[in-house]
Amino acid sequence: MTEILFGVLLTGLKLWESKESRKYLDKVIELRQSWIEEYSKPRGQRDNETLDEIETQLYLISKVFSEVGNKK
């Protein structure tokens, strides 16, 4: 499910025509890579705290993105 959220946010940021969009897009791409790397580890080696932190950052970026959309 998290992969779908990354996809939706990445698509939205690509469509958002703003100077700030590139900054957020780069961050989401970085977060996605970190999430995939951590999630791909065997369950016993996964750090759920790291996954939670990545998802929290993703949530905060999505809040900023949704607030920009509501202002238009």
Image (cartoon, helix red, strand yellow):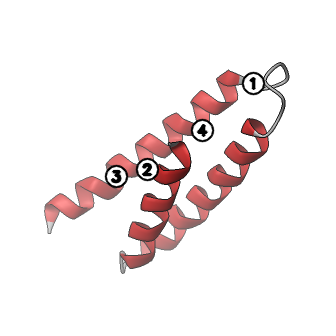
Q: CA distance from mark 1 to mark 3?
A: 27 Å
Q: Are marks 3 and 4 in contact (CB under 8 Å)?
A: no
> Hey, what amino acid is under mark 4?
Ile
Which mark is drawn over residue 54? 4
Which tag, 3 or 4, sits closer to the chain's start?
A: 4
> Hey, what amino acid is under mark 3?
Val
Image quadrant holding the C terminus, namely bottom left
Determine crowd level at label 3: few under 14, some 14-19, many 20+ residues with C-alpha closer than 10 A.
Answer: few
> Hey, what amino acid is under mark 2?
Ile
Indicate left or right for 21 with 47 as reference.
Answer: left
Indicate left or right for 58 with 26 as reference.
Answer: left
Depicted 6 relative to depicted 58: above or below = below
Determine crowd level at label 4: few under 14, some 14-19, many 20+ residues with C-alpha closer than 10 A.
Answer: some
| Mark 3 secondary-structure assignment | helix
- Foreground residue, 43 or 38? 43
Indicate left or right for 62 with 3 as reference.
Answer: left
Determine crowd level at label 2: few under 14, some 14-19, many 20+ residues with C-alpha closer than 10 A.
Answer: some
Q: CA distance from mark 3 to mark 4?
A: 16 Å
Which tag, 1 or 4, sits closer to the chain's start?
A: 1
Q: Are marks 2 and 3 in contact (CB under 8 Å)?
A: yes
Q: Which residue is mark 3?
A: 64
Which tag, 2 or 4, sits closer to the chain's start?
A: 4
Which mark is drawn over residue 47? 1
Q: Which residue is mark 2?
A: 61
Depicted 68 relative to depicted 4: above or below = below
Depicted 63 relative to depicted 14: above or below = above
